[in-house]
Amino acid sequence: MTLLLLIRHGTNDWVHGRLAGWTPGVHLNEEGQLQAAALSVRLGDLPLAAIYSSPLERCVETASAIAQPRSIPLRLVEQLGEVRYGEWQGAELKALYTHELWPGVQFYPSGTRFPNGETLGEAQMRVVQALDSLRAQHPRHIVAVCSHADLIKLAVAYYIGMHVDLFQRLTINPCSLTALSFERMGPRLLAFNDTGSLGHLWPRPEEPAQASDVGGGQSAADAAPGAPAPEKLE
């Protein structure tokens, strides 16, 4: 099993009112920094093999809070970057609600192109290609991937068989975690928009039962295989 942990970046001053897109210089605010630090703690001792991120600052800062305490190199992937919103980049959302393209973005995103930007269908294909490449590089590993709300929603929609035109029904909060496992029978959604305990994502064998224990321990069939130590990435 390969496990991808899809993480949305933490809160920044643009989250609740403007469409940041690829605008440079959008950093985590104080709340976002605290969220990123808390997420690193929540991940605990999950054996992360690699950490990848969108190249945008808000994602890099979130992913760095996870990578640095674990001494895991952080690698940036262009395809994990935000949707190319074109002329809408930097706009206030309230100004876009009356735009003639807004209904298309909400209800027909597969065929609606942002002015001088991309369609959400195109964004979906590039993020899926990136994730497929990462899981092929790290079979039977846990890989953390820090990206953006729309990209994560689009990826989830693809892997669970939801049409892209329905993806707006999904919600991804800042610094939430969404877990996808890839097994022989296909992808499985193990956690979505999660902000709670994550220990269930990669169960570990219990300590061997002592002779005096009754019904203790865990059978070999129940025990999850141990993950290899994080690999050194250049």
Image: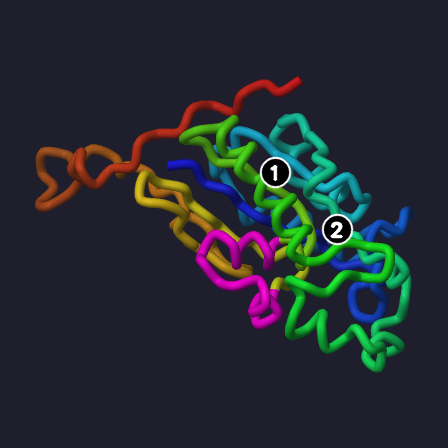
The residue under the point 57% across, 62% down is 164
Q: Please name whichever residue, 73 or 117, is drawn nearer the observer in this view of the structure.
A: 117
Q: Secondary structure at mark 1?
A: helix
**Image vertical order of residue 55 relative to residue 147, above or below:** above
- Residue type, numbered disc 1: Ala
- Magenta span has 165? yes
Which quadrant does the C terminus fall into? Answer: top right
Label the magenta part by its dominant secondary structure.
helix
The residue under the point 72% across, 55% down is 10
- Residue range highlighted in magenta: 152-171
Extreme residue toward the bottom, this view: 98
Q: Hey, which quadrant is residue 100 in on the image?
A: bottom right
Residue 170 visible in rendering: no
Q: Earlier in the sequence, mark 1 or mark 2?
A: 2
Q: Please name whichever residue, 71 or 182, is drawn nearer the observer in this view of the structure.
A: 182
Q: Please name whichever residue, 164 or 50, is drawn nearer the observer in this view of the structure.
A: 164
Q: Position of residue 106 (x, y in %)?
A: 68, 73
**Image vertical order of residue 183 relative to residue 101, above or below:** above
Q: Position of residue 58 (x, y in %)?
A: 78, 48
The residue under the point 65% across, 44% down is 126
Which residue is labeled 2 in the image? 82
Q: Position of residue 104 (x, y in %)?
A: 71, 73
Which residue is labeled 1 in the image? 130
- Magenta span has 158? yes
Q: Please name whichever residue, 103 or 206, is drawn nearer the observer in this view of the structure.
A: 103
Q: Secondary structure at mark 2?
A: loop
